Image (cartoon, rainbow, N blue to C red):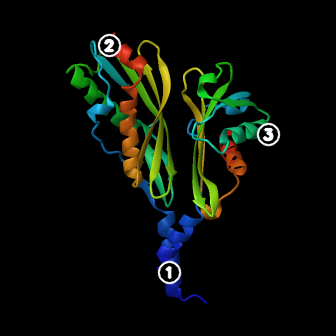
Amino acid sequence: MVIVAMTLLIAGCATHLAGPSAPNVKLQSYKSFYIVHNQSDVRGISKVIEAELALLGKAATSGPETAAPNSVDAIVTYHEDWKWDIKWYLLNLLIQFRDPKTNVLLASAASYRTSLARTEPELMTREVLAAIFK
Amino acid sequence: MMPSRWSAYLSGSLIMIASCTLQHVPKEQKIEPAKIPAFKVVGAVKLVNAQLSSEEAQIAVPGFAVTVNYKNYTELALKLLQNELAKKTPAAATGSAAKEIKLAIVDIKMLPMSGNFRCIINYTVETGDGYVRGLESMGGSWSYQTAIDSAVTNVAIGILNTEQILTYLEK
């Protein structure tokens, strides 16, 4: 019973931040980014990423994949999952940086927050970007 | 004060949960023929595992610390690819050939959802004529192991659904 209770407790407030998998890439020196807007993104996460990159002093624009310029240092893609619990909250956010010419993954990080550990999309985006740019 | 027996249960549970490190060795899944378009293979093709690191990488699965080996995962994806190429030309996938496909799985992320998992794999594929492309595959299941296995299978499917690669194989 104690184990079940503890498991439920842990599952209810779980938060996890998974860091980048390509440590050889120095994204800190990259200056310009283009965020490819997901068609399923109805809550404006692409704009949140754009704003958070701007706060880091990076030049960022967003739009559809077809309009992605080759001139930027990296293309940004993302996956987001939302869940309902009294109100909608961001459950998962995975942000990926890619080579604009080959689409090869340069770096990625993800954040997972369950209901009791929920936070604003801006803060979740910030922690994912911090994990990437650390 | 908490009885010592309860303390022992509590400590034991914490240690059990905290130390639950598992290594997932991917299982081979069958590729449904409908997922592979019609294509031809002209000549033999050398398949190369381009993932140089054989270190265990940790992926986040709530409640567990799961380790994966990108090199072994790449090897499984290549085996699935080899099976598909061999269906077209028995001697298509050989160790020495003029044509070459290099593959490296470079990133695996697990996104826990309501009652299921979504595994996202990023990989880099390179053909002998200089084509390089980063691609992504996904797999979903209520079990994180099956989600990973499906995503690895979808790596091979993704390669054989890439127009430039099929054109290269048909040259």
Q: Is A70 placed left or right of B153 in the picture? A: right
Type of the residue with mark 2: Glu
**Given contact means CB atoms under 8 Å apart, are the residues at marks 3 and 2 in contact?**
no
Quadrant that contains the N terminus of chain B: bottom right
Tell me, yes or no, if residue A85 can be seen here.
yes
Quadrant that contains the C terminus of chain B: top left
User: What residue is pinned by disc 1?
Assistant: B8
Discs 3/1, front: 3
Type of the residue with mark 3: Leu
User: What residue is pinned by disc 3?
Assistant: A55
Q: Is A105 placed left or right of B146 in the picture? A: right
Are tags 1 and 2 found on a single chain?
A: yes
User: What residue is pinned by disc 2?
Assistant: B170
Residue displayed at 38% across by 26% down = B161
Q: Position of residue B137 (x, y in %)?
A: 44, 36
Q: Is B15 placed left or right of A131 in the picture? A: left
Observer-nearest residue: A41 or B42? Answer: A41
Chain under numbered label 1: B
Observer-nearest residue: B53 or B91? Answer: B91
